[in-house]
Image (cartoon, rainbow, N blue to C red):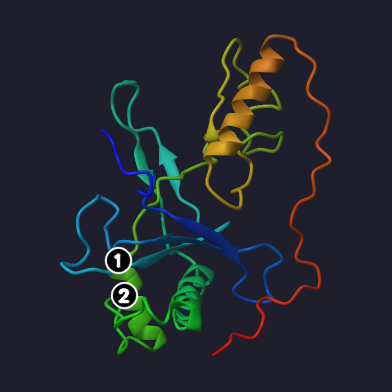
Amino acid sequence: MAAPAWAPATIFEAGGFIRSSEAFSWPNIQYHFLPVAINYNGSNAVKEHGFQCHVGSMRSPSRGHVHIKSRDPREHPAILFNYMSTGQDWQEFRDAIRITREIINQPALDKYRGREISPGITCQTDEQLDAFVRDHAETAFHPCGTCKMGYDEMAVVDGEGRVHGVENLRVVDASIMPQIITGNLNATTIMIGEKMADAIRGREPLAKSTASYYVAGDAPVRQPPLR
């Protein structure tokens, strides 16, 4: 399927990470900016032109579970993601909506900005924002951590993906992450696969990276907006 040279390769044309408050030393909110108003399933969010922001919580403290229901491996397990089960989750999404409004209100977007379609300018109080989040929040398809790496009582695999107490069985995917990472899982999962493949084949690991990475330190959460 051909497309003009100017056509975007993805609906997520830009993204970014921010800290919503001084309480976090890491960027706890992830942004995706879209040039269309669209639902995650590909359907139109509204029947008019628009653009939107998707926001997500990084390192959410909410925890779910996966339980085996049967000895039959063909039977699906019981999965509970347990989204929005802590006060931090709710506060992060309230902050994210309010910060998004601040971003969209900047002069650089004056010629593109129309009325706020969703949640709508009348949605202002914590209770109203919570109701909007409850009705519209959905998965971004990045589950991890159900077979964590480590040696504590909750650990399933060791540092080479070998299942504790079971011979000749490894788990090599996002489920072995011992902590939720700050971002999408894909690149980290590829890294896990490459590292485990080297271990299985007896290859020496690559030298430790010396690349710099973001540390908040004393940096302000945000600079004062233009308006």
Q: Is residue 223 visible?
A: yes
Coordinates of residue 3 in the picture (x, y in percent): 30, 41
- The residue lying at 56 percent from left, 51 percent from top is 183
Quarter of the rendering containing residue 85: bottom left
- State left or right for residue 189 relative to residue 198: left
Which residue lies under the disc numbered 1? Answer: 136
Where residue 171 appears, as percent x and y from the top left, is: 55, 24
Q: Nearer the viewer, residue 99 or 175?
A: 99
| Residue 106 seen in this snapshot | no
Q: Which quarter of the figure has residue 105?
A: bottom left
- The residue where tag 2 is placed is 132
The answer to the question of whether label 1 and label 2 lie on touching residues, with beta carbons closer than 8 A, is yes
Label 2 secondary element = helix
Front position in the image: 47 or 59: 47
Q: Residue at x 32, y 86 (%)?
A: 123
Foreground residue among 164 and 31: 31
Crowd tier of the residue under label 1, counting other residues whose Cα lies within 10 Å: few below 14, some 14–19, many 20 or above: few
Q: Quick one: label 2, few (<14), some, or many (20+) residues within 10 Å?
A: some
- Quarter holding the N terminus? top left
The three-letter code of the residue at mark 1 reads His
Residue 201, horizontal then vertical, whole percent: 69, 9
> Circle 1 sits in a helix, a strand or a loop, which is it?
helix
Looking at the picture, does residue 227 appear above or below residue 162? Answer: below
Type of amino acid at the residue the image marks with label 2: Phe
**Residue 109 percent location from the top left of the image:** 44, 77
Check the image and report above or below for 91 versus 201: below
The quarter of the image holding the C terminus is bottom right
